[in-house]
Image (cartoon, grey):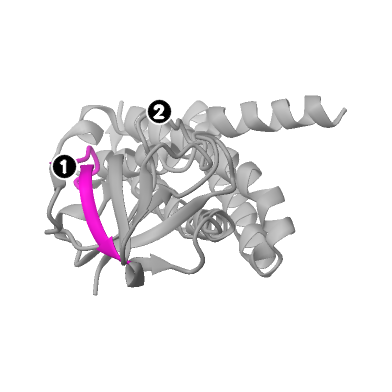
Amino acid sequence: MKLAFAHTERQSRYDLTDVKTEAKARSGGFSLNGQKSIVFGAPDADLLVVSARTDGGQRSAEGVSLFCVAPDAAGLTVRAYGTQDDHQAADLTLENVEVDASALIGSAGEAFPTIARTVQRAMIALGAEAVGAMDALNELTFDYLKTRKQFGTPIGAFQSLQHRAAEMLMAHKLSRAMVFRMAKASADDAALAQCAGATKVQIGQAGKFVGQQAIQLHGGIGMTHEYAAGHYFKRLTMIDALFGTAGYHLSDYATKSAISS
């Protein structure tokens, strides 16, 4: 069974607590109303896991609940589209979508800790994928530098390009170390939360750097649809955007540091 997690909303801007979708209790169940944005996998999902507020204010960590919703439920509109990295996503509109009490996952109003842990563990998987994409880009680029000739010499013999290749390699290795550190911390929620943002920053910045350098070192062929480099770069760009860009997590860290001091 394929599930799709519908949590992000248009106004939330990476804030996991920002949930406007409401679930009102009714006899024998709940009625859901609201909108969800960029739900990956929704177009062909067998079941949707939808977050909705049963209590509390819009940005409160308290009062968020999770519900199982069938993709063909009455009142549910699924607007499907493709993303730039050739994946499928959808925007959802819920208008008086009725679900039974059995559709509630866990206790009402207590889902946020589960959501936060799930997202942090998803960051580990995304980080590992990004490390693999950077490794593949490096391999493509380094091979190209060895075979592409200019003035009768492989361009990889030019010192300035060797410096770029070394920086690409270091960006990949540092990202790999950060993902390993995050995976090691996954058993401890506090430790995982502490290093999740830092890892996302490293992955986002390194992915952008490696992708840009790979395209420039390849030249025009790097942008063609038939060549893999551009596709890896697109995926790295989407990974950076998922669950907060590098810029968002840097800003979040700065804000929290200012408050704590």
Query: Residue 203's x, y, as percent?
Result: 53, 43
Residue named by callout 1: 82
Left or right of 251 on screen, residue 241: left
Query: Residue 25's x, y, as percent?
Result: 37, 55
Which tag, 2 or 1, sits closer to the chain's start? 2
Q: Amino acid at mark 1?
A: Gly
Residue 216 in magenta stretch: no
**Quadrant of the rendering where the N terminus is positioned:** bottom left
User: Residue drawn at (21%, 27%), measured in percent from left and top?
Assistant: 220
Query: Residue 27's x, y, as percent?
Result: 31, 62
Residue named by callout 2: 11
Q: Residue furthest right?
A: 261
Q: Which residues are magenta?
A: 81-100
Q: Amino acid at mark 2?
A: Gln
Q: Are marks 2 and 1 in contact (CB under 8 Å)?
A: no
Task: Name the one closer to the observer, 144 or 53.
Answer: 53
Overall secondary structure of the magenta section: strand
Query: Residue 190's x, y, as percent?
Result: 73, 57
Q: Is residue 156 visible?
A: yes
For residue 169, the mark is none
